[in-house]
């Protein structure tokens, strides 16, 4: 029987194995945050968040629709005012109506109304 020669391990073999292990390991940096806390899990809040996409999307749509309606109303109003103004200019009339319309515009700017998703509406006057 032939005797098997045992290969002696040298320091070079050990070094190469360490280098290979170092390459495969992911080096992580230490956390620099000083504040540490605990995370809590609330299943009800999670369910509300996950199922609430449709609700939030619908509220955005409603809000956009109301804003669009307000803009349309304002544009129609402006068009009527311009039509009246040009008609008066053609007739050569200029009266108190123009001043009243300007005062109405100023009053509208002073009053601002905001409606929030929670159902609360806030009226801000005097801006």
Image (cartoon, rainbow, N blue to C red):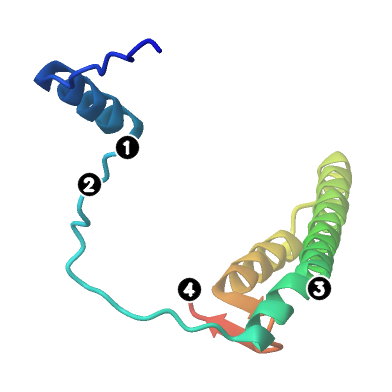
Q: Position of residue 94 (x, y in %)?
A: 75, 53
**In the foreground, 46 or 30:** 30
**Disc 2 packing (10 Å; few <14; some 14–19; many ≥20):** few
**Disc 4 packing (10 Å; few <14; some 14–19; many ≥20):** few
Q: Position of residue 50 (x, y in %)?
A: 73, 71
Q: Residue at x 65, y 71 (%)?
A: 108
Left or right: residue 90 versus residue 28 is: right
Q: Is residue 115 visible?
A: no
Q: Residue at x 55, y 74 (%)?
A: 110
Alpha carbon separation for disc pair 3 and 4: 33 Å
- The earlier-in-sequence mark between 3 and 4 is 3
Q: Residue furthest top?
A: 2
Alpha carbon separation for disc pair 1 and 2: 13 Å
Does the residue at mark 4 contact the one at mark 1 (Cβ under 8 Å)?
Answer: no
Q: Residue furthest front?
A: 1
Residue 53, numbered circle:
none
- The earlier-in-sequence mark between 2 and 4 is 2
Alpha carbon separation for disc pair 1 and 3: 46 Å
Q: Residue at x 35, y 31 (%)?
A: 24
Question: Dot 1 lies on which element?
Answer: loop
Quadrant of image for the N terminus: top left
**Tag 2 residue:** 29
Residue 55, numbered circle:
3
Alpha carbon separation for disc pair 2 and 4: 53 Å
Question: Dot 4 lies on which element?
Answer: loop
- The earlier-in-sequence mark between 3 and 2 is 2
Residue 1 to residue 32: above or below: above
Alpha carbon separation for disc pair 4 and 1: 63 Å
**Tag 4 residue:** 127
Left or right: residue 126 versus residue 109 is: left
**Disc 3 packing (10 Å; few <14; some 14–19; many ≥20):** few
**Tag 1 residue:** 25
């Amino acid at each position: 029987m032939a005797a098997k020669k045992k290969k002696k391990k040298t320091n070079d073999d050990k070094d190469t194995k360490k280098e290979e292990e170092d390459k495969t390991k992911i080096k992580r940096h230490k956390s620099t945050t000083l504040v540490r806390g605990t995370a809590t899990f609330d299943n009800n809040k999670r369910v509300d968040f996950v199922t609430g996409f449709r609700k939030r999307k619908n509220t955005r749509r409603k809000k956009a629709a109301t804003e669009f309606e307000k803009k349309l109303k304002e544009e129609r109003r402006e068009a009527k005012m311009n039509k009246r103004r040009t008609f008066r200019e053609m007739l050569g009339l200029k009266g108190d109506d123009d001043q009243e319309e300007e005062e109405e515009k100023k009053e509208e700017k002073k009053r601002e109304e905001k409606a929030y998703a929670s159902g609360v509406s806030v009226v801000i006057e005097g801006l």
